[in-house]
Amino acid sequence: MNLSVAIYLAFKELWRFRGRYLLVSLVIALITLLVIFLAALGEGLANGNKEYISKLDGELLLYQEQANLSVSASQLGRSAMNDIRRLSGVADAGAIGTSSVFIDYAGAEESESVSLLGVEPGYPGEPAVERGEQMGSLRANEAIIDRNTARNTGLDVGDTLLINATQGTVDEQYPLKVVGVTDGQQYFIQPSVIIPLYTWDRVRPRPTSTVGPSELTFNIANVKLEDPAEIESVSRLLEERVSGIEAVDRVTAYEATPGYVEQASTLNTQRGFTLLIGVLVVGGFFQIQTLQKVGQVGMLKALGASNFVVGVSATIQIVTVNTLGVIIGGLSTLLLTMFLPPSIPIVFIGQEILVAVLTLLIIGPLGGMVSIRYLLRVEPLTALGLAN
């Protein structure tokens, strides 16, 4: 009986002051939109840095020892690959070279900036294609483009792209045939073009023109283990047997990307402050509401309403207003992302969104706890002005 009375009183007041409560729900909706958007933006930016590395078919990445896990600073020689592949516990390994270039293509209004990744066809590091075929040889004039490059440029299997690269003081163009399209393989917040390692070494930008033969160098090596459970022991073995290298797992590798940790910390701080604002907004609104209806609550208690009825009624109002705001905010976020350009890196991850939504659903009751406590302490005679 008490519960039904509490529910009736809660929704009766919500309907009576629906405009006021709807306004608060809309404020909560804006907070929800901001929190979910920041979560999706943070994941999108992080994904742009780690996508290629996180999807590598291997457990370890090898860097030059003095490079401090900086891909661009790391330089490994081609001769080291034989030593790496012969070690016990190593199933296979592949060299990876990275650079940034512009590409042109038929119908392009302006050049497209991409990450140019050189890999060894058939070895760990070459991504599997969704359509088309894998690259043929180390020196083939072929390319695999990732889904983002295909979307941004309209290129597909069979098309030709032009690599624009500066060799010394001369700007050169190198035509490559697109033989495959893979899934998202962003690297350093750019879409990717993956080409054979020797082709990469020939077309990548250089400060000076190459004179005479020299050993091919690349940035990092991707190592696939026979038993992933032995990652620590094989890491130590690699560092002992192959001079001048440092071995780390994939997570450590992409977290060492310049700005990755700082970027995540900044966005998480923004989300934390946004949630704090939500608690203060909800708490402040219901505190004002409580002060305005002290007399009404005193009358209800004088008529026999228990603290249970008063407390449950107030809690239902808070949860309802907060839930409505979260639902409106969530739907608004999804609607907003439908109109955002593809260049804005928004990625919705179920777990991240679920955590954000659950947190937002909790802040309502949390923010309203003070007002509920105040209602429970209202004395009927004092509230009605009849106390001596």
Image (cartoon, rainbow, N blue to C red):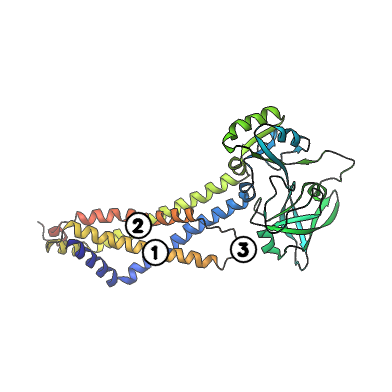
Neighbours of disc 2 within 10 Å: few (<14), some (14-19), many (20+)? many
Q: Nearer the viewer, mark 3 or mark 2?
A: 3
Give the image location of residue 288, x and y in percent: 29, 61
According to the image, label 3 marks what residue?
342
Residue type indicated by callout 1:
Gly
Marks 2 and 1: CB-CB under 8 Å?
yes
> Quarter of the image containing the C terminus?
bottom left
Q: Residue furthest top?
A: 240
Q: Which secondary structure lies at badge 1?
A: helix
Q: Which secondary structure lies at badge 3?
A: loop
Pointer 2 or 1: first along the chain: 1
According to the image, label 1 marks what residue?
325
Which mark, by number, is residue 364? Answer: 2
Neighbours of disc 3 within 10 Å: few (<14), some (14-19), many (20+)? few
Pointer 1 or 3: first along the chain: 1
Which mark, by number, is residue 52? Answer: none
